[in-house]
Amino acid sequence: MAHFVTWILLMPLASFLFVMLMGSWMNERQVGAIATGAVGVSFAFSVVTFILLLHQSSREVTVHLFSWITVGTLHVPAALLVDPLSITMCLFVTGISALIHLYSMGYMHAERDYRKFFLYLNLFVFSMLTLVLANNLVLTFVGWEGVGVCSYWLVGFYFDRDSAASAGKKAFIYNRVGDVGLLVAMFLLFSHTGTLTYLSVFAKSGALTPTIATLTVLALLLAATGKSAQIPLFNWLPDAMEGPTPVSALIHAATMVTAGVYLLCRMAPVLALSVPGRTTIAIVGGVTAFVAATIATSQKDIKKVLAFSTISQIGYMVLAVGAGAYSAAIFLMISHAFFKALLFLGSGSVIHALNGEQDMRKMGGLAKFLPLTFPTFLIGWLTISGIPPFAGFWSKGEVLTNVYQYSKILWILGVLTAMLTAYYMSRLFVLTFRGTERFREVTEGHDPHESPWVMTTPLIVLAALSVLGGLLDLPWVHHNSLAGFLDPTFGFIPAIGRSSGLAQTGLAAVDVVAAIIGLLAAFSIWRTSVSSSRYESPFLEHVWHWDDFYDATIGRPLTHAAQFGDDVIEPKVIDGAVGAVAVSVRRSGEGLRKVQSGFVRHYALATVLGLCVIVVYLVARVA
Amino acid sequence: MHSSLWLSALLLIPVVGAALSWLVAKREGWSYAVAVATASVEMAVTLVVVVLYNNHLAGAQTFDFAGRFVLAAPFGLAYDVAIDGISLLMVALTSLVVLVALLGARDKRREPAFVAWLLLLTSFTMGSFIAHDLLEFFIFFELTLIPCYFIISQWGGRERARAALKFFIYTFTGSAFLFVGTLYLGFAHQHQTHGALTFAYAALSATTMSHATAVWLFIAFTIAFAVKSPIWPLHTWSPLTYAEAPTAGSIELSALLAKLGSYGLLRFAVGLLPLALPSMRPVLLTLAIIGIMYGSALACVTPDLKRLVAYSSLAQMGFITLGIVTGSKIAMVGAVLLMFNHGVITAGFFLIIGYVERRRGSATIADLKGLQGPAPVLAALFTVVMLASIGLPGLSGFVSEYLILIGTFATHVWWGVLGILGVVLAALYLLWAYQRVFQGRVEGANAQITDATPGERWVLAPIIVLIVVLGVFPKPVLDRITPSVQQLIEHVAPAGVNK
């Protein structure tokens, strides 16, 4: 098994290195095929490892690769932890990545930096797998930052566009702020348990006092808000839509942005030690889910709607973590990866068909022109809206059922969010595929055309997964389910009381009713109008003026302070003080004026003479 | 125990090379060839020393290649050399930096003199790092000033005269304090032992003194080292000097000579005067943190790339100072590693900025835009160096920064937290600079620039390789630093330095 799991990790790295060294001798198709094939093989290895793990008595296998950093009491190996959680992550990360690589071969066709795109994509997959497979926090941090830098490159892929360059930078900086949390969490754990290896930290977590545990959990939450785009650090994700659409699907919907949730789940035994910490997590998740959903209702760019939708859905996952429903969070993470990747790739297909247009006001009536994109997108839309029997209904239902047990207020917030979700997604669906054809200007009169097979195949596979994803964890099945499989990782955590069958059915009915209300509302409003000042508030469109707030409170004051430092403190205060000392020394003796010749050889000579005099004096005195 | 002749060779080869390159000055290009050959031989000898170096000598003694010859007994003047894991790394850096500076930043104006100064500078720096005697260290430390001064004042930019003078006065004044401190310590030791005057490191480290004396000496030493490093607020010579010096000069100054300051602080201030450390620690921690914040803030707004690297170095030297004075072994190992890594990274920065300047005649950020379009390889190389400086895990900068921060956090929580904030700032100013220089729509003269030539790529290759290898597999280096740091800490420990 050690070999197989190592190869999961090494395949994308090998492909990255190969394409980097040999890429200039390869054509576009070969580069795409190698990059995609490598990730496909990685998926195959993940399946093999998964099967081997199923047949193993121990569900936690550590694979030591080499010793990375060892100083004093700090031992950080490059080692992998194969357990149900990490292998679950591997399976869906490599699977979705392979599909999106395939899609990119078509989408990025004839782009300027085609080869570079696949290099970044491969490196991303490698980093993401490092993140989930690491057996210690520092190695996870390697993946954590690795995915961040790949995201930086891919968001700023069209580097000659200023908006893209700024968006890439913004994503990186926001993530860095979150990283402060991860670093603090690591340092706290190391200071109090003396180790950073997950299993040892958990074994020694008794050494953490309640205060330290809470601080650690809050620091981890800060890290998660950066990477997973939660309040207060959520605002980089909508900007990140500047990247090519496959990137948005892979990194900014399916995989990287869920890393924060993964980290929180991975640290579940530490989270278990702090009630205030988990309460904060639940509140952050619930509020983010709701706020992002309100913003999504007023966005005009199809990808921005999906971006805020992603933030909102991750909010659900964070809420689930806070409520202690870890396997529900993972379940939603997986099904979200299916349907959100589907929706992003579908929107990419739409954008592709409309020569790059992303404004929904210039779409409409596309259903009949895109015979494969339309039905798959329809499935994605129904899935995210929470309509049974699609995956979203089951996974969101699982989260909300657990939240209902945990806190009624957060549950109501969750149901409202579900209603808003159905609303904004239906709005998007109607504006894009139904209604009048408003795209003739951007297509210069032509009919939009369906995308090539490399792009539609992933859509079909993802649509199938969205339909069937619910089977992973049906509420009445307790064996051979995702929750059962994850039990060795999360099982020790005292389960919150399970709802009765009847209550579950009732809650599910509430979800469906909420979804249908949202859906009908959207249809009645947007079937006829394209934009509406009544239903699209500028406040929501401008993201609650969140950016302006940061700019006014942090950005501008800091810039002014730095500018003040450069204009005044450095030249006037510090240099001034040093200069004043120098001048006063100079003037202390009139005779010295002649020496102020400015020639260094005089200074040098004076130095040597001075040294000699002092030495002679001292020697004479001692002797 | 290996022969000290190896170290003497390291000291003499560049001197011989400088003389030779001067002798062949009449023939066009020969001096340069001689200089490159000299630097290559120096590198080869350095590699031999690195391979031979043995840090498992008897009695936890990690000094190898030791040798002592008294030159003038009445003056306590001796030639005394030895290296431990810490100096080994600095020796390697010295040889690397001069080779890279020669190959990557060739300056054809009055070339024989230029390369001769550069080689002499190498010899003097080498002398400082191998010196096992305080007076000998001081002499070499002081001698480095002369080649630096000439390189800046003769080959520098428009304001070279002012830059050279400012640099000279600053560092010269600083070392005056070091000189007085050195003599005082030597005589104090002689007074105690009633023996001969000596400045030998081992002998001086056994000197007993009052707390007040230790503090005064520590302050005197630290002023000299703080100017050199630089440590805030004695840094204001560095932005001007780095910006005005020729590329090779900026590389030598920032990558190498700055390390003389932090090396001196570690080896001589902390190593010889541990008694003063507890009371000096809060001061230095504060200055280090201010340096990190202040340097990062000014790096955000400064209009010139070279000045940006100068301020970035101020911040990085803040991290090094943090690691040296916290007293945590992990942090101290990180600080030594960062000295090396920062040298490599800064050399990379100045080389690339030099390439840009060679093409565009300017390193002013406002003059540059969108260079990634016409020069993708140059942009990629800059990106790697930048990410290493930001501390991206997997690259060299991360390991050292992480060790410093985790060690600092364990001993001084709040300083550690403030240091972590510095990590965010580094990303801010570097990514912003990258955006303004390499991204955006390319127009005019910027669109005409050529990408990195094969020669330029080869010069940067060792830097990139070191950045990646030391990020992924730092173990061999850590294994050489750790015992020496351990030895230093054990010596210092009774004075309140833990673990």
Image (cartoon, coloured by chain):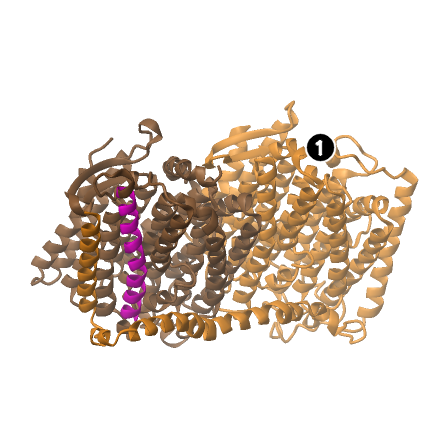
Quarter of the rendering occupied by the N terminus of chain A: top right
Which x, y percent locates residue B280? Answer: 45, 51
Residue B237 appears in view: yes
Number of numbered markers: 1
Q: Amino acid at mark 1?
A: Phe
Q: A471 or A410: which is nearer to us? A: A410
Q: B339 or B224: which is nearer to us? A: B224
Chain orange in the figure, letter: A
Q: B419 or A380: which is nearer to us? A: B419
Asked whether residue A577 is drawn in magenta, I would say no
Give, as a single range, the part of the protein colored magenta: B163-190
Q: Residue at x 48, y 64 (%)?
A: B294
Residue A486 is left or right of residue B413, and the answer is right
Q: Residue at x 56, y 68 (%)?
A: A558
Quarter of the image where one finds residue B494: top left
Which chain is disc 1 placed on? Answer: A
Residue beneath label 1, please?
A: A485
Asked whether residue B188 is drawn in magenta, I would say yes
Chain brown in the figure, letter: B
- Most prominent secondary structure in the magenta stretch? helix
Residue A236 is left or right of residue B57, and the answer is right
On screen, residue A484 above or below A561: above
Which x, y percent locates residue A71? Answer: 46, 37
